[in-house]
Amino acid sequence: MYKTTTDDMWHFRPLADIMSAPTTTNHRTGVGTKRVPHIHLSFDCSDGYYVPMTTRAIYPHIAAAEALWMLQGTQDPSFIARYSPMWAKFTDEEGKVAAAYGYRWRKAFGRDQLQQALKTLSEDPSNRQVILMAWDPSIDGLGNYHAKNVPCPFAFTLNIIDGKLNGLVSQRSGDFLVGVMYDILCYQTLLAVFAATLGVPLGQLSFTIADCHVYEPHFEAALEMLAAPESPPLPRSPLLRKSVETALSAPNLYVETVRQAQTVSSTRYKMEIVE
């Protein structure tokens, strides 16, 4: 378990554990990988700021854009494409992202999980059955390698304890340097929006990652990060607490407001997703 509140160097500890693992080859990608099981991360979000990222340049407004796209509940990547070209790799012949997280939450299974989750917690803050599920057991995983995108964070459990909203992200797989850092900021954004909608303070955000890894093309950069002297603390980027309704009424304004307030590390490593 790795816990942090305002520790700028928090990510060095799990990264060091991953880089000390042996290198194996992933069958699906054919790429060398260092991987460890069951990484647990826990962040105190009560101060209202994004988790600090100093290892490489990470942009909170891009994570916020992905969170807003998820709230939209669509397979259409037009909105997120303005901020992140990554999702173009996962579109099908119709230009849709078939397994889009927000679509799975809001439309795929015959119920709007997001709306029902917020309604449930509003009416019963003691409820322990609020889970947003993105995994479709009828088509995801289990040897099906034909899908362009299979959800990595597959479940988001929400609860209110001591009056604060907490979230637990269950993740089957996580590319620590490329994906996980953005996942953290994305789910922080979602937690802040949900807390504003419910009118409660922010609590803990935690991640359980079943397979946390670094791919071989990123080994050199990872080792350079671990060898570098500690970076000076950065001013932290504030979370924008707006309700779901307000955020969705002007999503580009929400993202731009986050962008204008964000602080980004000057440390830059070019890292592409390994598909």
Image (cartoon, rainbow, N blue to C red):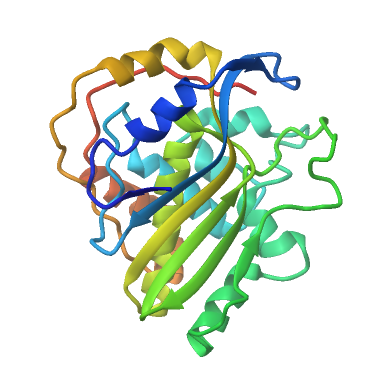
Quadrant in the picture for the C terminus: top right
243 relative to 223, above or below? below
Kindly indicate the quadrant of the structure image that contains residue 89.
Answer: top right
211 sits to left or right of 177? right
Kindly indicate the quadrant of the structure image that contains residue 221.
Answer: top left
Residue at the spot 40% in from the left edge and 68% down from the top edge: 246
Q: Position of residue 194 (x, y in %)?
A: 44, 68
1 relative to 248, above or below? above
Q: Position of residue 22 (x, y in %)?
A: 57, 17
Does the image show residue 133? yes
State how many labels appear.
0
Residue at the spot 81% in from the left edge and 30% down from the top edge: 145
116 sits to left or right of 184? right
Residue at the spot 65% in from the left edge and 69% down from the top edge: 113
Q: Camera-side residue: 25 or 17?
A: 17
Residue at the spot 59% in from the left edge and 68% down from the top edge: 114
Q: Position of residue 25 (x, y in %)?
A: 68, 15
Q: Camera-side residue: 257 or 117?
A: 117
Q: Position of residue 271 (x, y in %)?
A: 45, 19
Does the image show residue 65? no
139 sits to left or right of 2? right
Kindly indicate the quadrant of the structure image that contains residue 55.
Answer: top left
